[in-house]
Structure formats: structure tokens, C-alpha cells
Image: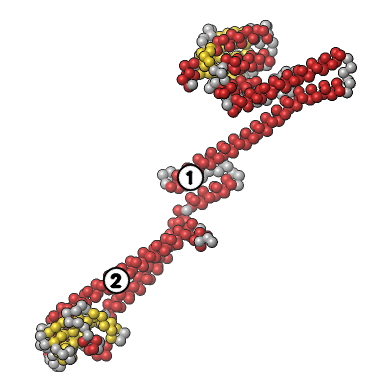
Amino acid sequence: MRHPLRRMSLRTRLLLITAGLLLAGLTLISAVVSDSLESYQLDRIDTQLRGFTELIARVPSGGLPAGDPRTKSLDPALDLIGAPYVLYLDANGAVTGGIHSSRLAAETLPSPEDLRSLPVHGAPADLRAGSQRWRAVAAPTPGGTVIAAAPLAEADALISRLRLSSVLTGSALLVLLTGAGWLALRGGLRPLRRIEHTAAAIAGGDLSRRVPGIAAPGTEIGRLAVSLNTMLGQLERAFADRTASEARMRTFVADVSHELRTPLFGIKGTAELYRMGALAEQSDVDEAMHRIDREAVRLAALTEDLLLLAQLDEAPEAQLDRAPMDLRTLAGDARHSLRALDPSRPIELTGPGGEVTPGPAPVYGDEARLRQVVTNLVGNAVAHTPPGTAVRVGVGTADGWAVLEVADEGPGMTAAQAKRVFDRFYRADRSRARTAGADAGLGLAIARSLTRAHDGELELETAVGEGACFRIVLPLLELSADRE
């Protein structure tokens, strides 16, 4: 069963705890003050009684006779010390006389029997006379004992008034401070309520909400707000990344399904024609087998590309067999490949950025994989530019990096196309007729993944009507060797 306090709000619990501590403090202070005042009053009366008994003890035993002028002379003194009552006892304890203030009635005085029981030279003692308390002290005289007693009515009344005043003042103070505490807690907990509202909005789906600047950064609430905002930012990015990843995965699956379906349908359709006997001539059968072989090769190439991309995503370094090499070798081979593919194209071999002389570009890489990247860039330049378009191959170092460029003077691409050109299955012109062996849109994605596996980057500079320049940027050999 839950504790009742746990069912209350934090503000109510804090207020109850604070009010309880305040009540305990006020009660303790009131008790200490009243006890101290009572002790002070008793000490004062005891001192007066001891001094008075020492004075009266010098008077001859038997007390003052009635009508003695000294009795009237002592009355002001009796009033001065609190209207005491004085009783004389002989050696046998018999009452021999007594005096008291004229302000005291005889029926309110302590009985002689109670006064007689007081120890001589003892500590002051309390006596009861009806409903009134008395304080009494006994002292020896040459012929007996003298006892002085004083009523505590005034002292008790003063203590009662003090306690009543403490209760009233403490109650008012408790109410006022509790109200002030309620307002203070309400203001102090307002940042937590704003955090609560922010959390509720986020739980409702608004991941962009943040905790506002509700307190100074150095305070506990301020540090909590900063930590929560950092966490919320990470959560928002994680959800956005997951959403983007799911969208990419759906697109990827749809594209893969389309790319696989096309050759499979071609193979299935050709086989269906053969089964139905539609291929009567041997030449028709040979042509059908040729189409099946072509689609099978295309399907195998697509499968190999997909497998390579998956391996590069999971463990890119494991797909490389690195060794020291120079990108100039790949640049020279790229020039020969371009001439073989289109002898009408002007081919120029330069340094990076069009410098006159190509330079060395030593790297620590997998030559076969980098050759695959360059071959893809060469094929891309030939496939997407008109015949006879000039192509430049640049190689060398720039800003401490090894660089190999394949730049053409073709139609170029828009900013939107350039942004997505490295996406898997992306084609700048999706309406273009698909021919046998046409690129499935994985070449540049594989090229960039292979370049990044070498701790480098594949960059693109292009604009509409200004051609396109694909640039492979890799760490130089000494930097690459240090990383191994």
C-alpha cells in the first residue's frame, strides 16, 4: 500500500514538511522562552526570600507583638519583595507569631502545618494554598525557625500570558509563513511544470519542443534544462535518422525489386515463348538464348554490385588489399580507356585543376578497387556526354592530398541532380530508355563507398552547361602509412 504522502503532489509534500518543521521550531522556542522566564522569576523570588529571612532571623524569636510599630514599618518591605508571609516557630515547632502583607487575606495563606514541614537550611520549596502556588524558605533563628513565603500568582500569570501570546503569535506566524511558503514553492516549482509541459508535448509527437531558459545555467534547474535539451536534441536526431533510414530502405527495396524484376521478366518471357513453341526457327532459338544470357549477365552484375555495397557498409576495410601505389598509373590507363571507347574525343592529361604537368600521387590503397572507381568515372563521362566531347584527366597532389580527376565538358547537372548523384539507383534521366547492360544506378554509389573505405572522398563539381568534374581525394602515402 502506498504511503499517503506519496499520493500528494511534490508542492503539497514540501509545504507540509516545511510547516511541520516551522511548527516544531516555534513550539521549541516558546517552551524554551517560557521555561527560562519561569526559572528567572523563581530565582528572583528565591533570592528575595533568602535575603528577607536572613533579615527577619535577627529579630528576637517569638515574632513581633501585635501593635508593635515595627510591624507597620515592615509592611512596605513585605510588599516590596512580593507580599510574603512570615511565620515564627519555637524550638519545638510551635507557632509563636507571624506577619503578612496587609494585601493578603488570612484564608489565602499557606497552613502552618505545610510551612512547618519545610527543612531548615533547605532549598526553596513550592506549597499549595487552595488554587494558588507559594514559594517558601525556612531559616534558623537563635530561638527557633523563621519561614518566609511569597505567592507565585503574579509570576504564574506572567508565564500564562507569555505562553498565550506565544501560541497566538506562533499560530499567526505559522499561517503567514505557510502562505508565503506556498507562494514561494509555487514560483520555485514553476520551471518543473514547464519541463513537464515540454515532456508532455514531446510525448504527443512534437519532437522539436525544447525546455526554455527557465533558470540560470549554473543552478540545478538550469543544468537540468541544458541536459534535457541535449537529450531531446539527440532523440530528435535519432528519430529523424531512423525515419530517413526507413525511407531510404523502402526506396532501396523498391529499386532493387524493380531492377531484379526487369531481367527476370525478360528471362521468364523468353522461356515462356520457347515453351509455347513460338520459336520455330533455329535462329529464333539462338536469339532467345542470347537474350537470356544477356539478362543473366545483367542480373549477375547487379547482384555483385549489391553484395559489394552491403560489404562496404558493414566492413569497408575488410574489402581492401592495400599496398603502396601511385594514382598516375590509373590516370594513364584512364586516358587509354577513353581513347578506346571514343577515339573522336580530345583527351588531356594534366595536374589537378588543369595544371600543365601531372604530378605524382602516392597513396596506400587497393589498386584493383581504385581502378574500379576510375573505370566507373570514365564510363560515366562517356555515357553522359555527346560523342567527341573533350575529357580531362588530372592527377597529382593538392593541399596535402593525392588527387585524381575526371572532368568533361558535357551538359553538366543541376544542383538537385548533383546532390543525389551518389544515391543508390539514382539516374539523372529516369525517362531514358533502358538498354541491355544499362547502368542500374549503383556505379557512383559504389565508387564513393570504395573511396571512403580508403579514408578519402569522391567529390563533384558541376553546373548546367559547364560540364562535370569528379575528383578522387585520398591521403598521401606517408599519412596513410601512419594510420595503419
**The residue tagged with tag 2: helix, strand or loop?**
helix
The structure's colour scheme is secondary structure
Per the image, the residue denoted by label 1 is 225
Answer few, some or many: residues within 10 Å of disc 1's Cα (few below 14, many 20 plus, some between 14 and 19): many
As displayed, is residue 375 above or below residue 125? above
* Residue under the image location 27 percent in, 70 percent down: 36
Inspect the image, locate mark 1, and give the three-letter code of the amino acid beneath it.
Answer: Ala
Residue 467 visible to an observer of this rendering: no
**The residue tagged with tag 1: helix, strand or loop?**
helix
As displayed, is residue 192 above or below residue 252? below
The mark found on residue 345 in the picture is: none
Answer few, some or many: residues within 10 Å of disc 2's Cα (few below 14, many 20 plus, some between 14 and 19): some
* Residue under the image location 88 percent in, 20 percent down: 278
Per the image, the residue denoted by label 2 is 35
* Residue under the image location 64 percent in, 9 percent down: 337
Q: Is residue 230 left or right of residue 252?
A: left
Inspect the image, locate mark 2, and give the three-letter code of the amino acid beneath it.
Answer: Asp
Residue nearer the viewer, 192 or 373: 373
Residue nearer the viewer, 262 or 175: 262
Name the quadrant containing residue 391. Answer: top right
Between the C-alphas of marks 2 and 1, the distance is: 50 Å
